[in-house]
Image (cartoon, rainbow, N blue to C red):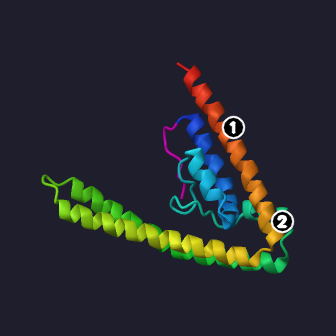
Amino acid sequence: MSHLSHGASPQALARQRHWRPLAALLLLASVLGVAPHAHAQAGAPHPGGMGGHGMAMGGPHLDRMLDSVNATADQRAQIKQIMQAARTDLQAQHAAAQSLRSQNQTLFAQPTIDARAAESLRQLMVAQHDAATKRMLQARLDIANVLTPTQRQTLAARASQRQALMLRQRAERAALDKASP
């Protein structure tokens, strides 16, 4: 399913397409705790692929990352299996989150807002988010156990380089946005 918005500017579409290849790198680099920090600092929207969780699972981007750390065939198979299991689990989490957002919209569309119901729904949303982030952490830990320390260091270095590039590109976009009328 595409996350591209109809009628979006070419710059917005390019930024959205930019996240797809990055999502797999973010997952593997986050094994070291570097990528979530980089993503938050970049002030970027959630990458697509897994309902905003930044977990694109597989494809040529994953293969390139595994190539960059010289992953063995056994490591590749294990990591792909971990990512597939996480994707399945997170798809259910995403559906639950969509349901809670729908309930939230319904609640706030009422003529009178029930503050207790709103707070109860907020707590459910926090619990759902907590469950999803726990599952993502488990996937990262499982992947970390498959990779060697050297491979994790290589991914951390790539994540740092990618963060620097993203921050530079963000600054360039901001400068262009300021300059345009």
Residue drawn at point x = 83 percent, y = 61 percent: 68
Q: CA distance from mark 2 to mark 1?
A: 25 Å
Residue 97 in the figure: left or right of residue 139? left
Q: Is residue 21 above or below residue 85?
A: above
Residue 96 seen in this snapshot:
no
Residue drawn at point x = 52 percent, y = 73 percent: 134
Along the line of sight, the residue nearer the viewer: 17 or 161: 161
Mark 1: which secondary structure? helix
Residue 145 seen in this snapshot:
yes
Q: Position of residue 11 (x, y in %)?
A: 59, 35
Mark 2 surroundings: few (<14), some (14-19) or many (≥20) residues within 10 A: some
Q: Position of residue 174 (x, y in %)?
A: 59, 31
Region of the chain picked out in magenta, as a range? 1-8
- Mark identifier at residue 151: none
Three-letter code for the amino acid on which mark 2 is drawn: Val
- Give the residue pinned by disc 1: 168
- Give the residue pinned by disc 2: 69
Three-letter code for the amino acid on which mark 1 is drawn: Arg
Sequence-earlier tag: 2 or 1: 2
Q: Position of residue 89 (x, y in %)?
A: 52, 76
What secondary structure is the magenta-colored segment mainly?
A: loop
Mark 1 surroundings: few (<14), some (14-19) or many (≥20) residues within 10 A: few
Residue 133 in the figure: left or right of residue 98? right
Residue drawn at point x = 69 percent, y = 37 percent: 168
Q: Is residue 45 above or below residue 52?
A: above
